[in-house]
Image (cartoon, coloured by chain):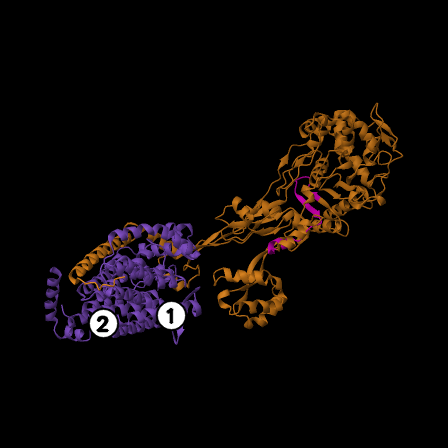
Chain colours: A purple, B orange
Amino acid sequence: MRLSDTHRLISSKAEPYGDFVHVLRRLNIDGPLLGGVLLISALGLVVLFSAVGEDMRLWLSQVARLGAALATMFVVAQLSPDFLRRWTPWCFLAGLVLLILVLTTGEVGQGAKRWLNLGIRFQPSEIMKLAVPMMAAWYLHDRQIPPRAGALLLLAVIIAAPTLLIARQPDLGTALLIAASGLIVIILAGLSIRLMVALAALAVPGALLLWKFMEDYQKQRVLTLFDPNSDPLGAGYNIIQSKIAIGSGGLFGKGWTNGSQAHLQFLPERDTDFIFAVLGEELGLLGVLSLLCLYVFVVGRGLYIAVQAPDTYSRLLAGSISLTFFVYVFVNTAMVTGLIPVVGIPLPLVSFGGTSMVTLMAGFGILMSIQSHRKLLPH
Amino acid sequence: MDLLSPIKDHHSERRLFIGRVALTSTIGILLLGVVIARLVQLQVFNYEDFAAQSQGNLYRIEAVPPIRGLIFDRKGRVLAENLPAYQLELIPEQVDDLDNTLRRLALLGLIEAEDIPRLKDLSESGPRFKPVTLNLRLSDEEIANFAIQRPRFPGVDFRPRLVRHYPHGAAVAHAIGYVGALSKNDLARLDASNYAGTAHTGKTGVENSFESNLHGDVGYRNIVTNALGRQLPSELADLFESLPPNEIPNPGANVYLSLDLDLQVLATEALQGKRGAVVALDPWSGEILALVSAPSFDPNLFAVGMSTSEFAVLKNDLEQPLFNRAVRGTYPPGSTIKPMLAVAALETGATNLKHTILCRGYFMLPNTTHRYRDWKPEGHGVVDLHTAISQSCDVYFYELSVKIGIDNIHDYLDRFGLGRVSGLDIGGEHQGLVPSREWKRNAFRHPEDQRWYHGETVIASIGQGYMLATPLQLANAVAAVATRGIRYQPHLVAAIEDTLTGQRTMISPTPLDDVVLKNEDHWDIVIDAMHEVMQGLRGTARQAGLNAAYEMAGKSGTSQVISIAQDEEYDEEEIDERLRDHALFIAFAPVDNPRIAVAVIVENGSSGSRVAAPIARKIMDAYLGYGSNATQ
């Protein structure tokens, strides 16, 4: 097998790194993945410093969150894939219960019920970002691959239940991402291409149905995508200003902390969802491409880990985590550049905020666990 | 489902998985390619466009309104000025408890309690840093009151602004007009860029007609702003590229009127409690000395701004204070047209100095039974032209009118400016009406209505029937008599002063077509008779002309508002005030060297000589420097 050859090649190549690689291995840490994640985070902190208006206090709080997220990643990496698999159904169930609790007793913030206060305030939807692909992978673990019709039906329920609960909060962006992470598991498990095409065809009436259930602000976002100039001071404002910011950055950017769009508050949500525009304005096309390269490297490493994974559960989970990460990157960058409607999805590892970063790092922890525990299993 | 435990083929499963990773990766790379292509499009191909747009975002040009020019009367007294007024403002982002703040302000009487919901809405809708005006004009007492309480109202403060102020308010309102808030309609006719910073514009009168002089030129100031429009401190502004230079606004020109404030005040007082108008002008230049319409209104209300209900009260007032009677009010001129008609009769040979008639109190057209009555039921006896004017014998003019004919009447009255717009520099004039056969043919649709009847000529000779004139037209006409036919266009603005250089541009009188007579002596005949009206033994207005140190000429007019049936007597006591006759009077003085011509109308004033003539006398006294109201 050609890929096994490649694997042997990489393993043998790993020898010259010596003690350092050894230490990382013992700590169940994947060196290349850690390197990629740290580089993205570092670049992210540089951009964020400018985006928060050079506010040291805000910036340090993000550094602290990054530290906590890295610690989470380290802890999760120590949990073996078998352990994770055994606890997957409970994890999923707990997530479902918490989502129902959010809808009944949750705290309202910015017009939506997303937060739950159980001693600490958190968004149960974050749990589901990992629990849904885990559950889907768990379900397929000892079933026939590609899945049969019955299995697909149950998988549909596994994905639909949390998606709908989150969409009700309403948090359409997260709901769509969670649905995507589950769907990716099914696609990776070998969902027939014919069925995929059929599902894509169903997407048209599905979209119409979705439109009916959308909130006005969500409809507005879709409508302004097609013609942002129709409402330049209202809903189209974000997209217009963000395009101006990125476009005016040019090849090399206006220089770090010199973005007029970002610093004179033309750019809305500049430190969260629209931070990519700050990067584009201040560091130009070069800065943007550098970040995208780093993302591609991390996704590639994740997919490599998935291909190397020894069993169905780890393979599907690793693949889903990596590809979902890519979806995050794509959705955010496409939204900021005005290619798709504005859905509230942050730029992973760069945007200000802790919750989503902890979840992302936990995901990378799972990837590392899969990679580092692989050697314990027979080939 | 799968009850038989399926045998998992790990190798084929892994192969399938690798295939799917390859598939999804390909899709991913394609999607990424789209994003990168988009970035290249934005940052490379459209770079210049977006760079320009981001620069445009950065600084904003703010218009700086010019200071409006002042308006003065002929003696340099200020009629319109700009006064700092203090307005109460609230900055929403600095107020912790909006409801409480507004409630406490209402308790202090600084805002109306009923306005609270509107102000609350206003404070919550706009940008949080943008001040909301709570009260447009604080009195000194309110300022003092608030100053003590200020620490208790964070985010609320008073700020000065310039407000148009008319110190003599109602007395000059109809001549000067007023400024009001700039509306969309105004912007459609004005140069919008020049008004970018202006909040008020002239709506009527001089303020409106001389808007282009008074307004000035807008200036510009560049400010660096953020997206919310908030101005940034200038140090930060220095960080960014140099901005185009600022432009200081050019203040508006000062306007000097020919109007005499003393005459305005005097006429306003004379018309107090009445509906009417006074127009006085200099016959040798057309300069308007007084232009008063009563009742009047306070133009300051418009400058400061009033509520819809306040405006409705003013607008729906039955006395019509907003209606400029002096230039827009049309009245049957009554006997005041007799001097002009006498000129027509003399010129057309319909009469001469010796021609007399026997007035028996009524006149009948040949072969008819309708009696056209004289104001004096018992008649004037034997009457010549001189007596016909001085005692205002209607029958004499009834007879003449048939001889002159309506078309000649129209022709001569037209030469005196009746029935046409005079071209007063504040516009808004009504053209009045001098009927003719041609006019009647065009004015009516049905052929039977288009025919001119002799009877209509008869009543036209005493300024009744279709005939209508404005007080301004009557003043112009009597001025033409005073100058013996020399006519000038009436105007209010005498000079315009450039505020920066102090240079004054005088407005020279605009001559109109003179009334040229075949025999100049005819003027003397008419003027002598008008002199007799005021200072003769039997003149109709001799009471108004008593004890004068100068010689004056005039003609009274009393025009019917309703028609009286053939055998009915007009009884002043019995008739509703609104249906009483209008009182008119025209005059000029001094007779030998006319310096002022006056037209007075008092609506439903009953008698021209008793009610209108004394007002004209007061005006002339004051202007010529006599009596208690002397202005010189």
* Residue displayed at 30% across by 56% down: A249
SS type, badge 1: helix
Mark 2 sits on what residue? A82
Provide the residue span drawn in magenta. B279-305
Q: Is residue B282 magenta?
A: yes
Q: What label does residue B164 carry, if any?
A: none
Q: Is residue B468 above or below residue A203?
A: above
Q: Is residue B473 above or below residue B57?
A: above
Q: Residue at x 86, y 37 (%)?
A: B568
Q: Which amino acid does the dot numbered 2 rest on?
A: Asp
Residue B125 placement, left or right of B448: left
> What residue is pinned by disc 1?
A98
Residue A34 horizontal/vertical position (percent): 22, 69
The numbered mark 1 sits on a residue in which chain?
Answer: A
Tell me which numbered mark, 2 or 1, is placed earlier along the sequence: 2
Regarding mark 2 in the picture, which secondary structure is present there? Answer: helix
Residue at image point 74% right, 33% down: B340
Q: Position of residue B70 (x, y in %)?
A: 58, 52
| Amino acid type, residue under disc 1 in the picture | Leu
Quick check: A178 left or right of B599? Answer: left
Residue B410 shown left or right of residue A334 in the figure: right
